[in-house]
Amino acid sequence: MSSSQVMSQALRAKIMSADDAAALVKPGSHVGMSGFTGSGYPKAVPLALARRIEAAHGRGEPFRIGVWTGASTAPELDGALAKANGIDLRLPYQSDPTTRQRINAGSMEYIDLHLSHVAQFVWFGFLGHLDIAVIECAGILPDGRLIPSTSIGNNKTWLDQADRVIIEVNSWMNPALLGMHDVYYGTRLPPHRKPIPIIAPGDRIGETTYRCNPDKIIAIVETHAPDRNTTFTPPDEVSGAIAGHILEFFEHEVKQGRLPRKLLPLQSGVGNVANAVMAGLDEGPFPHLTAYTEVLQDGMLNLIRSGRMDLASATALSLSSEAAIEFNREIEFLRDRIVLRPQEISNHPEVIRRLGVIAMNGLIEADIYGNVNSTHVRGSSIMNGIGGSGDFARNAYLSIFMTPSTAKNGAISCIVPMVTHVDHTEHDVQILVTEHGLADLRGLSPKQRARAIIDKAAHAKFRPALSDYFERACRDSSGKHTPHLLDEALRLLRPE
């Protein structure tokens, strides 16, 4: 493995093994790790740290750390440390099965945060002191500046705030990434804040590299490994139908004069339904699309490559193996069409509202009044976390939530009388879409919303029970504004 991507002679003296670097992490530390949706995460030091923690536990010594990231990472980080029982606190988002099991068993604490809030909470001192940062980079320039990898996330803040820094330089990453990133150093603490100067998705307002005091860098570890690649299945009948309803809705909004023909900047959550929408847009009538989102998936990359989308702004890539290969092969073409930003900027409410973003996100369940649960199963067990959906839903020009109408092979309705946990209130949900139809909730009262959701979005199998509940609630509820039968609202359509 070549070390040519460490171009600073002064910093080359700090190159060491992952085991030696992991030995510099002390028990009880708060550790800021790079990584966002399986891209740009450190791939060697967390594994070495997990081995060290297991050895300490084998000797009867306590050893756990706090892990702060941008979002979800990968088995080499979350998975390895969780299996070693090495994490006492995790934030702000996760998707690892072992991590999830430990959180729900009560053996790991978890703070689920809006992704736009994390960096500022650290700057405010709300989360305690950051002891050490472990950041993957694509290279180090001769003057010591760091070339970001395939995600930025909270890395700028980790580098600024941590007392000590470990850098993983991953030679698998294409050094031609240099120039794709936009690292903004203009944020301030209240009362000295200034407007974020972005008025179009492609505006560049920062620098292409990270700054880091070289005295803080205590170790450099060289790696050569790809990101965790996400596998996406081709659109099936359900995801294709959902995408079709959304595209038909866009056409209607253009005809009504509420959207321009090229639409407004798109934000899309992660998953197969989101990719199905992107595939539909690639075949649709909308030219010169743009995106202001947090994650760039295969579908959005295909839109750029086909010429349907002019530019995409995000904080991270989340690509399949095939798309990652295409990305590296075409990086010179893509570098001027993709901007990767810190997540405090990609998810910034001020910018989202100014640009008029069209937000499209998934859910676990929605109720008949439009409240959305996107994080919990049966009210108390976390799935992944709220991620950036709240940042976008609250501030978007159009807030769209999409889901199959049922789960568990049709046994459970995703449209219920009352959600067991609320992440997005009815005030932040404008459009609800399933394979059965699209409920446009704009301008409707709660009872009108309920009828629209039951008639347009619920599965036919569950529609009679939902209608019966709603009609009885309208008759028997003590309050008629948002009628509920509280003694049965959480039981209906949820088998024990």
Image (tube, rainbow, N blue to C red):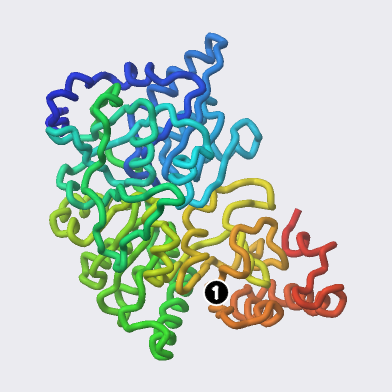
Residue situated in front as seen by the camera: 34 or 213: 213
Residue at 35% x, 42% y is: 228
Q: Which secondary structure, mark 1?
A: loop
Residue 215 placement: quadrant: top left
Residue 356 to residue 67: above or below = below
Relative depth, front residue between 203 and 250:
203
Q: Is residue 100 above or below residue 218?
A: below
Which residue is tagged 1?
430
The residue sitting at 63% across, 39% down in the picture is: 104
Q: Is residue 68 above or below residue 370?
A: above
Label 1, residues with CA under 10 Å away: few <14, some 14-19, many ≥20: many
User: Residue 354, how many percent across, how many down?
Assistant: 39, 69
Residue drawn at (50%, 65%), measured in percent from left and top?
393
Image spot of residue 249 (x, y percent): 45, 82
Where is residue 306 drawn, in percent x and y? 21, 69
Tell me where residue 145 sits by quadrant.
top left
Q: What residue is drawn where x is 14% and y is 33%?
A: 143
